[in-house]
Amino acid sequence: MRGLLGDAPGGSPAPVPPHRPIRSPGSGWSCLPPPPEASTPGRGVCMMSTSWRDKQQPSLINFIAAFLAANSYRLNFLSISPDFIFNNGGLSVAFVFETNWDCQNEDAVFSRVNRLKRQFKNLYVVVAVPTREQNESFNQSYHKYDIELGCPTFVPVNDPEMGFEKIAKIAHARGVCKQQDIISTMKIEREQAVQCMDAFLRVLTSIPGIDNHDANALAQAVGSIEAIAKASKGFILENTDLSMDKAETVVRFFRDPQYYLSPKIN
């Protein structure tokens, strides 16, 4: 029996070139590109619609698979509404990818886009317009359907390969921005935590005889101001290195009105 790519000398099936998906009759695309040999972690996941895939030329699918493998993306074939969904940096970005603009199909394209933009917050539409006539036709259709600028963003390109490169770059850029937002949030939370700790230390060191070391010991062993206020003298002595006098001072400070309402001179 002949192999999918013909027989090699000697009757054995010809080897499949690396990074080249092949399509077997009735079974769809059966070979995915292996992950890169480098030990660097993958950038993310690309989900390709099976219905979109089955309408494309094998050469384009080969290009996409090799491009993703070279850029450390994992490719999955799924039954999804958009043509592509990239998950990169914790952010999902959906794409409609028209690889050859056809003005006869404009109503179906724009109806689908309007439906998908209600389902996906981050949606882009990439349209290949290789000829001047197709570009003019696309522009006329865009204005005809009164698309709000940027809702979603349309990206015209010269050819499908350029279109997919644009898709990958957009997804990567959005993922990087998302990660930077997360980092900024973490920095803000860290600053807030430091400020809270500073306030905590100021409260405890306002107790006569309690210094920063004592305050940190109480924070680590007992916890919050509320927990320290409820802690017994024995508990403080057992779990910190505070002296008996300091432990008694802490307990009196929070529980003895005559003590904490009287003036203190450090």
Image (cartoon, rainbow, N blue to C red):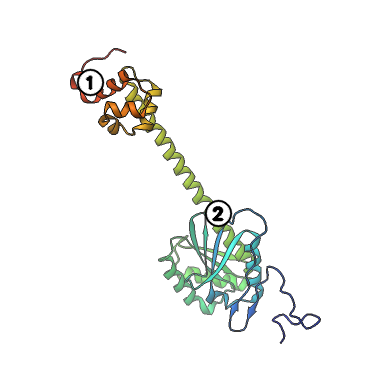
Instruction: Mark 1 vs mark 2: give the one in front.
Output: 1
Instruction: Please give the name of the residue rendered at 59% of the width and 74% of the height, measured from the top-left corner.
Output: 100
* Residue toward you, 16 or 236: 236
Residue 265 at x, y = what percent?
29, 12
Looking at the picture, which amino acid does disc 2 mark?
A: Ala
* Residue toward you, 193 or 178: 193
Residue 126 vertical position relative to residue 57 in the rendered view, above or below? above
* Residue toward you, 260 or 71: 260
| Residues packed near mark 2 inside 10 Å, few (<14), some (14 to 19) or many (20 plus) | some
Looking at the picture, which amino acid does disc 1 mark?
A: Tyr
Q: Residue furthest left?
A: 258
Q: Residue furthest bottom?
A: 1
Q: Residue furthest right?
A: 9
Query: How far apart are the alpha carbons under marks 1 and 2?
Result: 57 Å
Residue 109 at x, y = what percent?
49, 74
Residue 191 at x, y = what percent?
43, 35
Q: Which mark is residue 56?
A: none
Residue 174 vertical position relative to residue 221 in the rendered view, above or below? below
Mark 1–mark 2 contact, CB under 8 Å?
A: no
Tell me where residue 9 sits by quadrant.
bottom right
Instruction: Please give the name of the residue rendered at 36% of the width and 32% of the height, measured from the top-left corner.
Output: 221
Q: Element under label 1?
A: helix
Pick the quarter of the image with the C terminus: top left
> Mark 1 sits on what residue?
260
| Residues packed near mark 1 inside 10 Å, few (<14), some (14 to 19) or many (20 plus) | some
* Residue toward you, 121 or 107: 121
Determine if residue 228 is in view: yes
> Mark 2 sits on what residue?
173
Instruction: Please give the name of the residue rendered at 43% of the width and 65% of the height, measured from the top-left corner.
Output: 117
